[in-house]
Image (tube, rainbow, N blue to C red):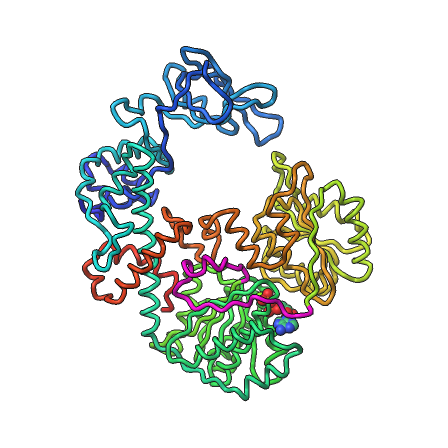
Amino acid sequence: MDLSLGLDKISGIGPKTYAKLEKAGLRTLGDLIYYLPRTYENYRTTTTIDQIRPGKVMIKGKPDSLKTTQARRRHLSITEGVIRDNTGAIRVVWFNQPYRVRQLNPKKEYYFTGNYDFKYGKYQLTSPAVTEAAEVSETESSFQPIYSAKNSLTPLFFKKLIHKLRGNFAAIPDLLPEENSPNFAQKGSRADALYSVHFPETPEDVKKGRNYLAYEELFEFLLAAKLNQQENQKLNAIKLPFNAENTKKIVQNLPFKLTNAQRIATWDILRDLEKPVPMNRLLQGDVGSGKTVVAALAAHQAAKSGHQTAILAPTAILASQHATGLSELLEPFGLKIALLTGSTKNKPSLKKKIKNGEIDIIIGTHALLTDDTTFRSLALCIIDEQHRFGVAQRHKLLQKTALSTPGFAPHLLSMTATPIPRSLQLTVFGDLDISILDSLPTGRQPIATKIMPEIEMQENLYPALREHLKSGEQVYFICRLIDDNDKSKTTDVKKLHKKISKIFFEYNVSILHGKMKPSEKDQIMQDFLDNKVQILVSTTVVEVGVNVPNATQIVIMDAEGYGLAQLHQLRGRVGRGKKASNCYLITSGEDQPSRRLKELEKSTDGFYLSEVDLKLRGPGEIYGSLQHGELNLQIATLADTKLIAAARKHATEFAKHPENMVKYKELNNNIKKYQQLTTLN
Ligand code: ADP
Ligand code: MG
């Protein structure tokens, strides 16, 4: 069976259906076969209504008297009725699923799967999933796949379509190369694995099949990274010689002593820059660990050999802070530094200077990426908060080196303040070089963190904040942006702004959220930085790298609603100056605070917290929110270190003979999407 065959060539799929499949991103037979079930139902576990017990249940019955009412709260509709079988009837309720009334035919039998619980004074089955009984064929295994719906294509549609292909599964060729394949994990064949996942008899079948497919996926990803690393080694980069004398001068001129971690990272980077192959390095350091000065020293080395550096930052504020910082540091040494953002005046004249090489270091936002920004000789690219940028943007920046110096790729330094658990680093970034700033500069004032129930704010928080405001310090309030979703208890940024403005009427209180125009946001941040505004009520848009050393107090509303990493980032907005800081994690007070919040109260170490996060959430979740935001592993999780180790070994061995790739067309094609993520050209 040729998996690259277009689905339009399959008998039974007409043009209309094909159009729908295509819209759902499914074009080839392979796309369809890899559309794996979302979950499975075991129809043997059905209970009769007279036997029902609270908890997760599956019953087979007919719906009756379904009707939808609109709750007083505008956004909530309630669909309720009963389900009957031969032994009795129970109450059923769905929230915000009014289509159930149309969907369910009182004359037909269905399987209902959901939670049966005591709620609002009655027992009821809440928001159950529904499968028509006729769809569950009695002749098949009673353990059956459930597919996700896609656009207008129903779960049943997929089930039937894939079922039709059942006889062809045996002819699916293997994808993985035989060369160097370890015995482990590769036992069996792809044909068997896919068959087990779509047509399992037992949960063990699914597990075995998914395991094989996970190995396949990891192999592809790791092979792509390995090949890229090898390709990158073949590219040319501009050599930027290290000059001890020059570097020393700058370091001695710093208003502080470099931390050990900074010294080691800088050394590694400056050494990389000397080589004729492009550096591809990730600099990881917690908020406030001092990544900027490391970047500055690298840019300085490039400038001293007559080449340019581009620094890309995700927001105008951040870019402008970098520009200020770097100017202070490097202009005394004769370097020319410029800022290019959307609001930069007289862009054409600045761009001309960049093109002529009159500017050594150009710092900017997306505005830097336009085609008309060209360099005389771009040797080094630095991307701050790199996970904020997509593959395409990164590519655009890197391309500018090839334009100025054909045949060359830039040295690349990516920076991130999201610490990645050490235990994951090898798997996620195994083929990047990594530098870590794992200690904060000495003399940093600690941030005292406190969990506080909302009702205590009046009595315990506001007076404390007022004291800090009186001594000239500034305050952040963080909450969600919600317009009027009264379903949840979360605090609305606009309401909070009103409230805080009243309470602290003697101070200037501003509001900041993501729906504002970039220029508006920048203005407000600037006002806060200049202390024209003393209290900033904001959504999480302040999360990224902003440095306002005079802000020492941060109050995070509905703290339970955020992840550990995000809370840590938010907290990093304070503790950046000479004074001690406070972080308040506000909770509803109804329940015991979560482990997450308690850990935050105890520790300010980002690496420690990332390990805790890993334990609490598991690697899959963490991975998703990491740098390779665009890399979405579908099947594998990083929990299976054995599988990863095997796939890595296999991929590394195989990559030693890239010429073998031609034999594996499908593999070759599949890995392209991963290769985009780490390539330098
Ligand atoms: P981040 O890693 O979050 O980007 P920054 O580079 O913005 O951190 O540095 C945070 C602050 O710490 C800046 O004000 C910077 O001048 C200061 N800083 C950096 N390195 C040191 C050091 N070794 N000792 C003291 N202060 C430092
Ligand atoms: Mg920074």
In the rendered image, residue 664, in percent from the top left (x then y), is placed at 21, 57
Q: What is the quadrant of residue 667 in the picture?
A: bottom left
Q: Does residue 329 belong to the magenta stretch?
A: no
**Above/below status of 143 relative to 455:** above
Q: Nearer the viewer, residue 324 or 354?
A: 324
Whether residue 320 can be seen here: no
Quadrant (top left, top right, bottom left, bottom right) of the N terminus = top left
Q: Is residue 6 visible?
A: yes
**Residue plotted at (55% across, 65% down):** 285
- Residue 516 appears at what percent x and percent y? 61, 53
Of residues 417 and 99, which is closer to you in this image?
A: 417
Left or right: 474 with respect to 630? right
- Going 41% across and 26% down the picture, which residue do you hit? 130
Query: Residue 600 in the image: x percent, y percent?
Result: 63, 52
Please state, as top left, top right, bottom left or bottom right, where the C terminus lies in the image: bottom left
Vertical order, 614 against 364 (above or below): above
In the image, the segment drawn in magenta is: 417-443
Residue 560 point in image, percent of width and height? 62, 44
Which residue sits furthest bottom?
Answer: 245
> In the image, what residue occupies the spot 32% across and 38% down?
206
Which residue is pictured at 23% across the width and 46% down the height? 188
